[in-house]
């Protein structure tokens, strides 16, 4: 996952949930860093990956990763 894709993910999160943006960004970045292979496999298998944070749950789809 490149920087633009991560930025797209975080921008989508900000628009989808009423939680602390800084905490959510940190938690998602940490999750993606620690589980990159798992996220990629889940995207490949299911077409989406579920990322759970203390602020809520986010569903990342393949379409979310397409550069705008």
Image (cartoon, helix red, strand yellow):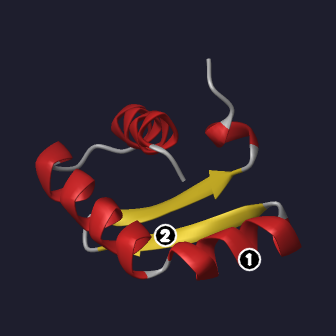
Residue at the image point whose x is 49% and y is 70% from the top: 51
Look at mark 1 in the image and give the residue it sits on. 41
Closer to us: 20 or 40: 40
Residue at the image point whose x is 69% and y is 32% from the top: 66
60 left or right of 18?
right
Q: Where is residue 26 in the image (x, y as percent from the top left)?
A: 20, 59
Against 41, is 2 above or below?
above
N-terminal-most mark, 2 or 1 = 1
- When asked about the image quadrant of residue 24, the answer is bottom left
* Labels in figure, total: 2
Quadrant of the snapshot with the C terminus? top right
Closer to us: 13 or 63: 63
Against 17, is 29 above or below?
below
60 left or right of 23?
right
Q: Where is residue 47 in the image (x, y as percent from the top left)?
A: 82, 60
Residue lying farthest front? 2
Q: Where is residue 50 in the image (x, y as percent from the top left)?
A: 58, 70
Residue lying farthest top? 68
Against 42, is 17 above or below?
above
Identify the secondary structure beneath mark 1.
helix
Look at mark 2 in the image and give the residue it sits on. 51
Residue at the image point whose x is 44% and y is 45% from the top: 6
Q: Residues within 10 Å of mark 1 (few under 14, many from 20)?
A: some
Residue at the image point whose x is 83% and y is 67% from the top: 44
Q: Residues within 10 Å of mark 2 (few under 14, many from 20)?
A: some
Q: Point out which mark residue 52 bears.
A: none
Q: Are marks 2 and 1 in contact (CB under 8 Å)?
A: no
40 left or right of 29?
right
Identify the secondary structure beneath mark 2.
strand
Q: Where is residue 36 in the image (x, y as percent from the top left)?
A: 52, 73
């Amino acid at each position: 996952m490149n920087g633009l894709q991560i930025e797209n993910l975080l921008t989508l999160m900000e628009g989808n949930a009423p939680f602390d943006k800084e905490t959510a960004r940190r938690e998602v970045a940490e999750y993606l860093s620690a589980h990159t292979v798992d996220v990629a496999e889940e995207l490949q298998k299911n077409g989406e990956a579920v990322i759970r944070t203390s602020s809520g749950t986010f569903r990342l789809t393949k379409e979310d990763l397409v550069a705008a």
